[in-house]
Amino acid sequence: MSRVRRAEPSEIDAVRHLLTAALLQPPPSLADAIAAGQVHVAVAGSDTHDSESATRAVGCLVRLAPTETPDADRVTACVESLDPSRRPFDPAAWPARTAATHVDSVAVARGWRGDGVGTALVESAVDAAGAAVGAADAVDAAAPGDAVDAADASTDLPPLTVAFRSAVRPFYESLGFTVVSAPDGERLVGWRMGDG
């Protein structure tokens, strides 16, 4: 049994190991992403602070802002290629967003695949991305010096986006992502509207 939570700075090596074992490149900003709460880990075992050695990360998901992802051009080009009535968001404004709404990578340890770990990580990211956007929008709308309450978040949330290999298309479609081919033909692009 595993549960998902935000990664702690002390888990950077475990996250890096999970990503590289899955043949994924950790982002250069991994430490910053962990510090900002943009990395989710699935942990197995007891998860109390007094039994630190009894837990281990069995999966991870890294969310980045569109401004930080190497997939920004691919996602933008994909959405621009759609009929304007089918576009899930404004492709011209998306790359400038600072809220972490793009899935950079998902990795699950080999012995834990097929047990719902990846699904739990993505569901956690959908929830967190909506909260991050709400907080960022509230900050953008606030006058200088005003207190900001995340509960004032907009309900018109942009989607959680992802670019991925065709082999994992069934996984993202099973989680409610709309999936289309990117114009470059190399990877697929998916998005899921926020539940907020």
Image (spheres, rainbow, N blue to C red):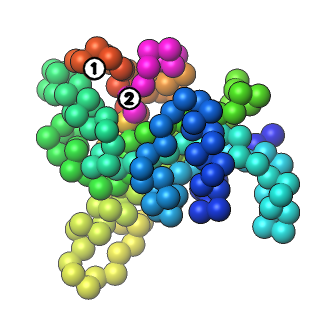
Q: Which residue is pictured at 71% across the width and 27% down the height?
A: 110
- For mark 1, give the secondary structure: loop
Q: Which residue is pictured at 36% across the width and 58% down the height?
A: 134
Q: Position of residue 161 (x, y in %)?
A: 37, 36
Mark 2: few/some/many CA within 10 Å (<14, 14-19, 20+)? many
The answer, for residue 161, to whether it is visible in the render is: yes
82, above or below 141, in the image:
above
Amino acid type, residue under disc 1 in the picture: Ala
Q: Position of residue 24 (x, y in %)?
A: 51, 33
Q: Are marks 2 and 1 in contact (CB under 8 Å)?
A: yes
Q: Which residue is pictured at 78% across the width and 67% down the height?
A: 49
59 drawn magenta: no
**The magenta stretch spans which residues?**
162-170
Extreme residue in the bottom direction: 145
17, above or below 11, in the image:
above
How far, Cα to Cα, is label 2 from label 1?
9 Å
Q: Position of residue 136 (x, y in %)?
A: 32, 62
Q: Which residue is pictured at 44% across the width and 20% down the height?
A: 165
Locate residue 185 relative to residue 59 in the image: left or right.
Answer: left
Foreground residue among 96 and 176: 96
169 drawn magenta: yes
Q: Earlier in the sequence, mark 2 or mark 1?
A: 2
Residue placed under numbered mark 2 in the picture: 163
Amino acid type, residue under disc 2 in the picture: Ala
Disc sitting over residue 99 in the figure: none
16, above or below 116, in the image:
below
The answer, for residue 193, to whether it is visible in the render is: no
Foreground residue among 97 and 59: 59
Q: Position of residue 85 (x, y in %)?
A: 17, 25
Residue placed under numbered mark 1 in the picture: 182
Quadrant in the picture for residue 76: top left
